Amino acid sequence: MQIDNEKDTLISLRKLSSNDDYYNIVFKKTERISSAVFYILSYIEINDHTKVHYAYLSDKAMALHEAVIITLNLFEYEVKDKIFPLQHALVVMESALTIATAARVVTTDITESIRAEIDTVLRYIRHHYSHQDQMTSSSSSAVTPAIRTRRARPNIPKNDFSSDAVLIYSDLGDRTTRIKTVLEAKPEATIKDLSEIITDVSTKTIQRDLNGLIASGEVIRQGERRWSKYSISSNIFS
């Protein structure tokens, strides 16, 4: 009986970052949602009509990214009480897309595709982790948060739709930070693992960033070429 109690204690102290189902269904899909929005923003021409939606969408995509990162450090026993901010960020993201679609800044097809992914994540969270059964999608709730005032962003140069331009000119986040975040959640990740989550840049760009992190001693590589696996270097924690 004592052994069983010890076993239960060990299970309850496991973090979500060690849960493969959570990583693949919630973390990976949520990061892909954020990356998809970042990519869409690169095709929005900034003008008086679109700039408010542009700022709002980028705010909410970044907030969603930050919310799901925080959940990786939650212990499984505390998830039900602390998963709500991620649920809220997903609903707000869907709401922002709906508003942008109504304003004809984003197309209906794109919004519906992303909404389907959001719905999948929300359903999984509600079924496995949440006691917030009243949580509903923005399609059935009409409350829209006020738009925050942000510092001015530099405009993306006209006709520059490259993935690098999205991150450089739009200030949508530092790729190396995102790569290290993924590697912390999934040690020994492959290029394929990273590219499935960070979808707004090419595989070659991810490889180039990894090479820089390896050169600086922040990431280590095991294996060669297509069999290579990457992990955070233990030196950065010492």
Image: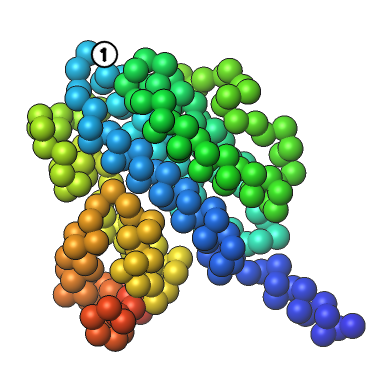
- Residue 105 locus on image (x, y percent): 32, 21
Residue type marked 1: His
Q: In percent of the image, x 33 and y 78: which residue is there?
A: 229
Visible in this render: residue 80?
A: no
Relative height, residue 2 to residue 153 (above, below): below
Q: Is residue 62 above or below residue 140?
A: below
Secondary structure type for disc 1: loop
Q: How is the image coloured?
A: rainbow
Relative height, residue 141 to residue 207 (above, below) = above
On the rendered structure, is 204 left or right of 61?
A: left
Tell me if I can see residue 5 in this picture: yes
Q: Quadrant of the C terminus?
A: bottom left
147 to the left or right of 203: right
For the point 67% across and 34% down, which residue is it?
Answer: 135
Q: Is residue 148 above or below residue 179?
A: above
Would you name the residue on which mark 1 appears?
Answer: 49
